[in-house]
Image: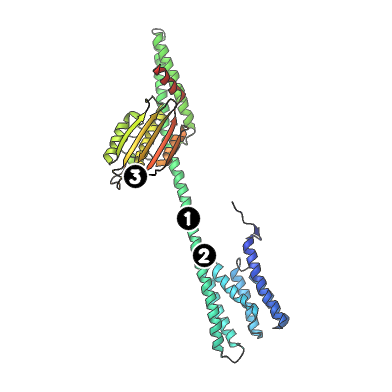
Amino acid sequence: MTVDRLILGRPVRGVAFDAAVSGLVAVFAVLGLLAEQGGLPAFAVGVAMAAALFFRRTHPSAVAVVVAALALAQVIVGWGPLGYDIGVLIALYSVVKYADRSRDGILAGIGAAIGVLLSALSWPGPSPWWAGALYYGLVTGAVWLVGLNVRTRRLYVLSLEERAATAEREREAESRAAVAEERTRIARELHDVVAHSMAVMIVQADGVRFTLDRDPATAREAAKVVADTGRQALEEMRRLVGVLREPSRPEPAAMADEPAHRRPALVELPALLDRFRAAGLRIDCGGAGSPVALPPGLELTVYRVVQESLTNALKHAGVGASVELTLDWAADAVAVRAVDDGRGRPVVRPAPSGGHGLVGMRERVGVYDGSLAAGPTLAGGWRVEARLPLPAATGTEEGSAAA
């Protein structure tokens, strides 16, 4: 990151340029003194103009007033046009460009017109006064118009920068709102998971109490269920602590086909795929490995990733697009991959949605320390790949079943 050095609260480059402009006017004052044009009083006026012009950016209106007063004094004394009078044009340009109010530039133009008239009346030589007025008027008018054009372009650029900054702030606010809403939804769903686990533990514990003396084998099995369910509930609760919990908000309209607080499961994937096929997607579903039982929260995350991937395909690839959906089961992770060909037509009805697209998927996958990759394909479609690590207990159960 580049940091501009400041002098007197102003960037070094701007201060150096203004100093150069003031120095130029001072040089003209020195040359006038050497040419014996007005003597020391005229030289003092030129130096005062040069000093005032150093502040032309920060105080353009005040500088214009000072320079105009000095130029008026020069006309009254009768020194005639001198070299350092270029400072008048510089002050006029500066007030038109930098003044906070357009009114100051207009007043400066009127003052310049009066100054042109007074200078023309004191025009030296045999030429008529109107010739001097025409010459000074053309030069002064050109400088005023240039200043106005530069001011307009400057304000336009500033407005574009402000719009871009406002749009960026709005995008950040929308992104934060989407993340907060998705975290609220995840927290509510995980709360349901933990509540279910606790209810199972209570029922099994009551069973242990009543069967401990009459059927020790059944009691031991129930105690094992209590222990396993408790461990799973603690794991889900640990993940829940990392999710921001906010008051419940209305469900998105696209979720109206799902009852409130219902937790979808992977067994419902065929029904989900049928809904998307009815909406217009051509879905080819496959995968490798054998599915294993997942903790409820992780199972919900896999379901939502599939749902959002197909929703994005329907929204962006369109009706009639082909989607290749794969679920690969390994000993340590489950991978979801959805790739569309991007060759559909515009959507004619809303698609079922599970949240806020990639934002929601990243939040869900991140809760379980998974990874998500999404981006365009060379063929013109879009791909979504998510990998979710499996709990150690799941892999152990799978190994025991295989044995």
> x, y percentage for residue 52?
65, 71
Dot 2 corresponds to which residue? 154
Q: State the image quarter where residue 112 is shown.
A: bottom right
Q: Is residue 105 above or below residue 80?
A: above
**Outermost residue toward the top?**
214
Of 290 and 305, nearer the camera is 290
Q: Give the labeled residue for mark 1.
A: 164
Quarter of the image containing the C terminus?
top left
Disc number placed over residue 342 in the picture, else none: 3
Disc 2 crowd rating (10 Å Cα; few below 14, some 14-19, many 20+) is some
Q: Of helix, strand and loop, which one carries label 2?
A: helix
* Left or right: 336 in relation to 41: left
Which is more foreground, mark 1 or mark 3?
Answer: 3
Mark 1 packing: few (<14 Cα in 10 Å), some, or many (20+)? few
Distance between mark 1 and mark 3 Cα atoms: 30 Å
**Could you say which quadrant of the image residue 130 lies in?**
bottom right
Is there any visible trace of residue 31 in the rendered image?
yes
Q: Looking at this view, is 52 or 392 the one in front? A: 392
